[in-house]
Image: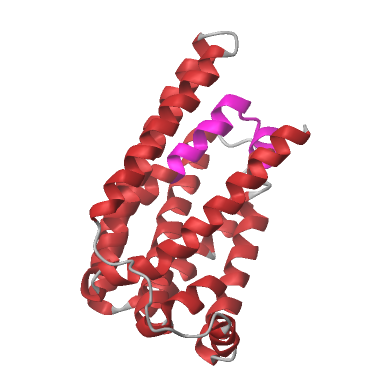
């Protein structure tokens, strides 16, 4: 247990370092005029890759036995990850700042960023959205299994329905965000999302064909989640974070 904990902790630290570096880099190589469409395409490709990975992994784990099946999956995933790192070498931007500033200037810039009312308002808003979303989605699998009566395997498959809903709606959300702005898309998606708990509340426990109705609500959640994600991401990089201070701002984010 201690070894697994240490490995997972190392993965978490390395991932956080990589993501903190990626955010200001993406502000350089993604033009603001097409950031919504870029995010949409990114989400579509990532969603279908995730679905394919889940299906392949489920098939391998379910059909085999012993430790080797897990080692093969981990090895293939590691190889794909290394290939992705190599391909990022040709993405422009991401160079170090050679301004010769003092080593503590980054922390002072982070302190200044925390005094920016736009950033603090954005963080409060996104924190509230995340809290509400997690409170809803964390207990939905238990609700489907214990109250609606769906089999455990079907409950797991519902996650792929969320991915499909998000993927199919991403292009439209991204196209609209680039044309009407980030805030209308973000607020429209969140307003639509407020109706989903009402849908779960009104869904009868003994409804006929529960898989269809639960799948529909999961699908709509995927549509809402991707719309709010695209709107929030575009608002963050196009309206909240100044490009010249992206490193300190995204480190806080």
Colouring style: secondary structure
The percent coordinates of residue 94 (x first, y second) are 33, 66
Q: What residue is shown at x 45% (from left), y 30% (from top)?
A: 54
Residue 148 forms part of the magenta stretch:
yes
On-image quarter of the N terminus: top right
Q: Is residue 115 above or below residue 30?
A: below
Q: Is residue 198 above or below residue 124?
A: above
**Image quadrant where residue 236 sits:** bottom left
Residue 209 visible in rendering: no
Q: What residue is shown at x 54% (from left), y 20% (from top)?
A: 70
The percent coordinates of residue 233 (x first, y second) are 41, 69
Taken as a whole, is the magenta stretch helix, strand or loop? helix
Q: Which residues are magenta?
A: 143-162
Q: Is residue 252 above or below residue 61?
A: below
Q: What residue is shown at x 66% (from left), y 49% (from top)?
A: 138
107 left or right of 83 in image: right
20 left or right of 82 in image: right
Residue 154 forms part of the magenta stretch:
yes
Q: Residue 85 versus residue 148: which sits nearer the camera?
A: 85
On-image quarter of the C terminus: bottom right
Number of callouts: 0
Residue 76 visible in rendering: yes
211 left or right of 6 in image: left
Q: What residue is shown at x 32% (from left), y 38% (from top)?
A: 83
Q: Residue 138 versus residue 233: which sits nearer the camera?
A: 233
129 left or right of 27 in image: right
The percent coordinates of residue 191 (x first, y second) are 48, 70
**Image quadrant where residue 4 sits:** top right
């Amino acid at each position: 247990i201690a070894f697994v904990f240490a490995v997972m902790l190392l993965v978490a630290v390395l991932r956080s370092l990589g993501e903190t570096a990626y955010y200001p880099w993406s502000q350089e190589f993604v033009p603001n005029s097409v950031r919504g469409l870029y995010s949409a395409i990114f989400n579509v490709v990532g969603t279908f890759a995730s679905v394919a990975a889940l299906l392949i992994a489920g098939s391998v784990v379910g059909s085999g036995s012993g430790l080797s099946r897990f080692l093969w999956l981990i090895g293939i995933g590691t190889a794909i990850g290394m290939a992705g790192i190599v391909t990022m070498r040709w993405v422009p931007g991401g160079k170090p700042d050679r301004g010769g500033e003092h080593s503590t200037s980054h922390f002072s810039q982070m302190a200044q960023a925390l005094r920016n009312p736009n950033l603090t308002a954005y963080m409060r808003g996104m924190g509230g959205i995340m809290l509400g979303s997690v409170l809803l989605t964390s207990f939905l699998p238990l609700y489907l299994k214990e109250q609606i009566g769906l089999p455990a395997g079907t409950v797991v498959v519902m996650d792929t329905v969320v991915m499909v809903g998000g993927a199919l709606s991403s292009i439209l959300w991204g196209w609209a965000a680039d044309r009407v702005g980030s805030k209308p898309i973000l607020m429209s998606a969140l307003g639509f999302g407020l109706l989903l708990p009402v849908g779960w509340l009104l869904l009868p426990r003994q409804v006929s064909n529960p898989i269809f109705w639960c799948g529909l609500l999961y699908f709509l959640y995927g549509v809402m989640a991707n719309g709010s994600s695209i709107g929030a991401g575009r608002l963050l990089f196009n309206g909240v974070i100044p490009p010249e201070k992206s490193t300190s701002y995204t480190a806080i984010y």
